[in-house]
Image: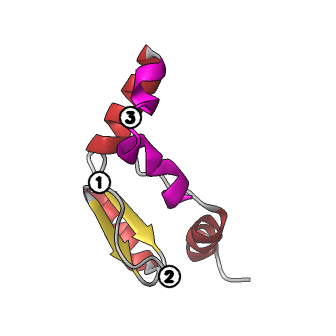
Amino acid sequence: MYETLAAWETDPTLAGHSALTNEYARVWQAADKIVHSTTLEASLTQRTTIERSFDPEVVRELKAAAPKDLLVGGPTIAVQAFAAESPAQ
């Protein structure tokens, strides 16, 4: 998913399609991004950190300190995040 969305920063023609795409590109580029990947060797975009494993406690700390909402993107990481917040069964 990250490699697809990185185009908002790596392909400058995307922002030029409309005012809406320009705003989306601006927001994407301004966002701090944490990418969880065991295979990605280097980030493709600015303001990006690559993490090799998902640590729910680190995400809790980020959430507690964040002045705005956080976005979790991608099915694998979303499942891990929901599992970490669900009561044990």
- Which range of residues does the magenta coloring cover? 1-17
Magenta run includes residue 79: no
Instruction: Tell me the residue at 49%/59% (across/down).
Output: 2
Camera-side residue of 49 and 70: 49
Determine which of the numbered discs, if any, sits on residue 72 in the image. none
Which residue in the rendered view is the most extreme toward the right?
A: 89
Vertical arrangement, residue 23 with respect to residue 68, above or below:
above
The front one of 89 and 54 is 54
Mark 1: which amino acid? Asp
Q: Which residue is mark 3?
A: 25
- Alpha carbons under labels 2 and 1: distance apart: 20 Å
**Badge 1 is on which residue?**
32
Q: Residue at x 32, y 56 (%)?
A: 45
Quadrant where the N terminus sits is bottom right
Sooner in the amino-acid sequence: mark 2 or mark 1: 1
Residue 41 image offset from top left, x and y in percent: 39, 79
Question: Residues at badges 3 and 2 in contact (C-beta under 8 Å)?
Answer: no
* Secondary structure beneath label 1: loop
Amino acid residing under circle 2: Thr
Residue depicted at 57% across the width and 69% down the height:
77
Residue 17 spot, x, y in % from top left: 48, 20
Q: Is residue 68 visible?
A: no
* Residue 61 figure quarter: bottom left
The quarter of the picture where residue 85 lies is bottom right
Which is in the foreground here, disc 2 or disc 1? 2
At which x and y percent is residue 9?
A: 36, 44
The amino acid pointed to by label 3 is Ala
* Picture coordinates of residue 49, whole percent (x, y): 30, 68
Q: Can residue 75 be seen from the camera position used here?
A: yes
**Of the residues under marks 3 and 2, which one precedes in the sequence?**
3
SS of the residue under disc 3: helix
Q: Which residue is label 2 attached to?
A: 39
